[in-house]
């Protein structure tokens, strides 16, 4: 894995923290899926997180 890879869960936590005052609040599942999709599209290098709240088998 690339040493510059970002952990999916770290990105999720920072996005939620950054937008914490948003009304309505961000849906963590939707944000997590968007993060994973952007990684699949090679927008950035991801380090898979097993605890990411998504309903797919990419990590396994």
Image (cartoon, rainbow, N blue to C red):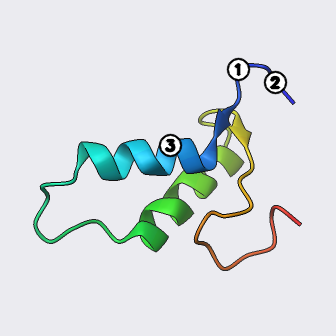
Query: Which numbered marker is on residue 11?
Result: 3
Quarter in which the N terminus is drawn: top right
Displayed quadrant of residue 50: bottom right
Residue at x 82%, y 61% (from the top left corner): 59
In primary-sequence order, the first of circles 1 and 3 is: 1
In space, the residues marked 2 and 3 are separated at their CA atoms by: 16 Å
Query: Which numbered marker is on residue 30?
Result: none
> In the displayed structure, would residue 12 be above or below residue 29?
above
In primary-sequence order, the first of circles 2 and 3 is: 2
Mark 3, secondary structure of its residue: helix
Mark 2, secondary structure of its residue: loop
In space, the residues marked 1 and 2 are separated at their CA atoms by: 5 Å
Q: Is residue 57 left or right of residue 15?
A: right
Are circles 1 and 2 on residues that touch, CB within 8 Å?
yes
Q: Nearer the viewer, residue 25 or 58?
A: 25
Q: Give residue 28's position: percent from left, percent from top.
A: 42, 67
Residue at x 81%, y 24% (from the top left corner): 2
Q: Give residue 22's position: percent from left, percent from top.
A: 14, 59
Residue situated furthest top in the rendering? 3
Displayed quadrant of residue 54: bottom right
Mark 1 crowd level (few <14, some 14–19, many ≥20, 10 Å Cα): few
Query: Which numbered marker is on residue 2?
Result: 2
Are circles 2 and 3 on residues that touch, CB within 8 Å?
no
Residue at x 78%, y 19% (from the top left corner): 3
Mark 3 crowd level (few <14, some 14–19, many ≥20, 10 Å Cα): some
In space, the residues marked 1 and 3 are separated at their CA atoms by: 13 Å
> In the displayed structure, would residue 4 be above or below residue 37?
above
Residue at x 80%, y 64% (from the top left corner): 58
Number of on-image labels: 3
Q: Give residue 60's position: percent from left, percent from top.
A: 89, 66
- For label 1, the residue is 4
């Amino acid at each position: 894995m690339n040493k510059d890879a970002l952990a999916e869960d770290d990105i999720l936590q920072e996005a939620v923290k950054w937008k914490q005052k948003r009304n309505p609040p961000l849906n963590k599942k939707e944000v997590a899926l968007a993060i994973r999709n952007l990684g699949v599209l090679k927008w950035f290098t991801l380090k898979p997180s097993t605890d990411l709240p998504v309903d797919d088998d990419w990590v396994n």
